[in-house]
Image (spheres, grey):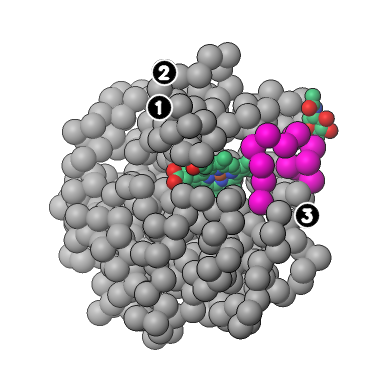
C-alpha cells in the first residue's frame, strides 16, 4: 500500500516536470505506471530526441503500428498482436538454444500462419508483413514491437522493455508444430510445456492475464467473439477474479485452462496473487512478456530501444473511486478513461 502510494506520488511529480513532447528521460521512474497527470502532455517520445541511433527506425514502425493499425486503441488488431507475440515465441523450448523463438517466423512462414492453432492471427500477420522491409527492421523486431505496443494500446497495459537486433529466421526455417498450448490439456501438461519454454508457474499465471483483453472465436461457435472477461478494452485484473468465480460473468467465455489454473492446488496460489492486484500483475506480466520476446536470443546481442515507447496509461487515474482505500476491483469511469486515451495516445487516434 505504502509503496503503491509512493510510486503514484513519483508519477505525479515526474509528470508535472514533463517538457512538451516528452523527452525520453521522463520515462517510467516508477517501473510501469504513469499517465493521467492532466498537464496536457502526450508523453510520446519523438524521434527528434532519439537517444540511440540504432533505435531511430523503430519510431516510424511504432507510429505505423500504433497509429496505422491500432489507431491508438485496444482494438482487435492490438489484442491479436499480443497473442501473435506468444504464438511466435511460444514454439520455443530451452533445449533449442539460440534457434527459433521470438524470430518473427509468423511473418515469414506461410505454413506456420495456416496452422489451426494460429486461426484468428491471419489479419494481424498480413497487416504487419510489409513493415520489416518498409522500416529496415527484422520480422522478429517488428512482431515483438507490435506485441508490446498491443499491450500498451490497451489502457492499463504496462511498459515492457523493447529490443532490436533479432536476426531474421533462416530461409526455409519452420517453427516446430504442436508446441502451443491447448486449452483442454490437463494443467500438468500445460505447466510442463511452459517449463520447457523457460517459464515458471508464477510467470505463466502472470502471462495468461493477457486474456484480460482477449476474445475467443474458435473455441465455441455459438458464442464466437465473446470476450474472456467483462472489460475487454482495458488491461485489468478483472479477468483473474471473474475466471475464479463459480459462474462466468454474463456475456463472457472462459477457457477451460484458465478455469483450471484458478482452482488447481499447484497453480491457484500464484494465480490468486493477481486477483485485485493490478500493480503486482503489471510488474510481473511486464517481466514475463519481456522474457517471452527474447526467447531464442541472447539479450546482450540486442539493443534496448524502450525509449520509443509511450507512457503507459494508469487505470488508477480512471477509477470511479480514486481516493482512499481502493476496493479490490475498482470500476473504471469511461469518460475519465477516454480523456486519458485522448491525452496519451493523441497522435495515433
Ligand atoms: C495455457 C496457456 C494458454 C492457452 C491454453 C491459451 C489459449 C487461448 C485460446 C484458445 C484463445 C482463443 C482463441 C480463439 O478462439 O480465437 C486465446 C486467446 C488469446 N490468448 Fe491465449 N492461451 C494461453 C496463453 C496465452 C499467453 C501466454 C498469451 C500472451 C502473453 C496469450 C494471449 C492471448 C490473447 C491476447 C488472446 C485473444 C486474442 C484475440 O482476441 O484476438 N495467451 N488463448
Ligand atoms: C494440478 O496441477 C499439478 C501440476 O501441474 C498436477 O500435477 C495435478 O495433477 C493437477 N491437479 C488436478 C486435479 O488436475
Look at the picture and state if 342 lies above or below 229: below
Tell me: 95 left or right of 171. Answer: right
Of mark 3 and mark 1, the one earlier in the sequence is 3
SS type, badge 1? loop
Residue at the spot of label 1: 230
Q: Toward the viewer: 68 or 293?
A: 68
| Residue 300 is at least partly visible in this image | no
Q: For mark 2, does the 10 Å Cα neighbourhood hold few (<14), some (14 to 19), or many (20 or more) residues?
A: few
Ligand 1 lies in quarter: top right
Query: How far from the left and from the top, in percent, is residue 223?
Result: 44, 28
Instruction: Compute the Cα span from label 3 to label 1.
Output: 32 Å
- Residue 309: give x, y in percent of width and height: 37, 63
Mark 3–mark 2 distance (CA, rounded to whole Å): 36 Å
**Which mark's residue is nearer the viewer, 2 or 1?**
2
From the image, state whether disc 3 or disc 2 is nearer to you. 2
* Disc 2: which residue: 250
Q: Which mark is residue 196?
A: 3
Q: Please give the range of residues in magenta.
A: 180-192
Residue that sits furthest to the left in the current view: 40
Q: Is residue 296 magenta?
A: no
Identify the residue shown where x is 51% and y is 50%.
119
Residues at discs 2 and 1 in contact (Cβ within 8 Å): yes
Lower sequence index among marks 2 and 1: 1
Amino acid at each position: 500500500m505504502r509503496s503503491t502510494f509512493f510510486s503514484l506520488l513519483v508519477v505525479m511529480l515526474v509528470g508535472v516536470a514533463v517538457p512538451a513532447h516528452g523527452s525520453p528521460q521522463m520515462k517510467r521512474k516508477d517501473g510501469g505506471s504513469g499517465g493521467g497527470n492532466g498537464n496536457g502532455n502526450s508523453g510520446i517520445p519523438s524521434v527528434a530526441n532519439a537517444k540511440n541511433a540504432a533505435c531511430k527506425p523503430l519510431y516510424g514502425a511504432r507510429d505505423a503500428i500504433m497509429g496505422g493499425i491500432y489507431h491508438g486503441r485496444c482494438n482487435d488488431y492490438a489484442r491479436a498482436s499480443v497473442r501473435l507475440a506468444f504464438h511466435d515465441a511460444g514454439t520455443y523450448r530451452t533445449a533449442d538454444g539460440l534457434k527459433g523463438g521470438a524470430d518473427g517466423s509468423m511473418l515469414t512462414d506461410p505454413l506456420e500462419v495456416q496452422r489451426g492453432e494460429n486461426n484468428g492471427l491471419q489479419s494481424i500477420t498480413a497487416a504487419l508483413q510489409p513493415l520489416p522491409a518498409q522500416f529496415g527492421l527484422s520480422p522478429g523486431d517488428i512482431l515483438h514491437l507490435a506485441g508490446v505496443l498491443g499491450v500498451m494500446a490497451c489502457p492499463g497495459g504496462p511498459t515492457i522493455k523493447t529490443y532490436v537486433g533479432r536476426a531474421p529466421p533462416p530461409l526455409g526455417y519452420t517453427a516446430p508444430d504442436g508446441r502451443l498450448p491447448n486449452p483442454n490439456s490437463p494443467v500438468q501438461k500445460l505447466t510442463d510445456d511452459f517449463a520447457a519454454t523457460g517459464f515458471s508457474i508464477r510467470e505463466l499465471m502472470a502471462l495468461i492475464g493477457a486474456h484480460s483483453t482477449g476474445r475467443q472465436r474458435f473455441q465455441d461457435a455459438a458464442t464466437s467473439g465473446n470476450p474472456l472477461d467483462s472489460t475487454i478494452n482495458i488491461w485489468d485484473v478483472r479477468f483473474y477474479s471473474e475466471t475464479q468465480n463459480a459462474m462466468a460473468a454474463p456475456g463472457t467465455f472462459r477457457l477451460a485452462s484458465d478455469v483450471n489454473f484458478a482452482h488447481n492446488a499447484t497453480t491457484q496460489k500464484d494465480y490468486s496473487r493477481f486477483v485485485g492486484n493490478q500493480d503486482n500483475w503489471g510488474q510481473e506480466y511486464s517481466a514475463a512478456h519481456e522474457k517471452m520476446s527474447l526467447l531464442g536470443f541472447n539479450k546482450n546481442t540486442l539493443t534496448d530501444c524502450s525509449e520509443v515507447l509511450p507512457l503507459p496509461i494508469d487505470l488508477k487515474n480512471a477509477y470511479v473511486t480514486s481516493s482512499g482505500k481502493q476496493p479490490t476491483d475498482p470500476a473504471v469511469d469511461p469518460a475519465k478513461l477516454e480523456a486519458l486515451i485522448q491525452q496519451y495516445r493523441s497522435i495515433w487516434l
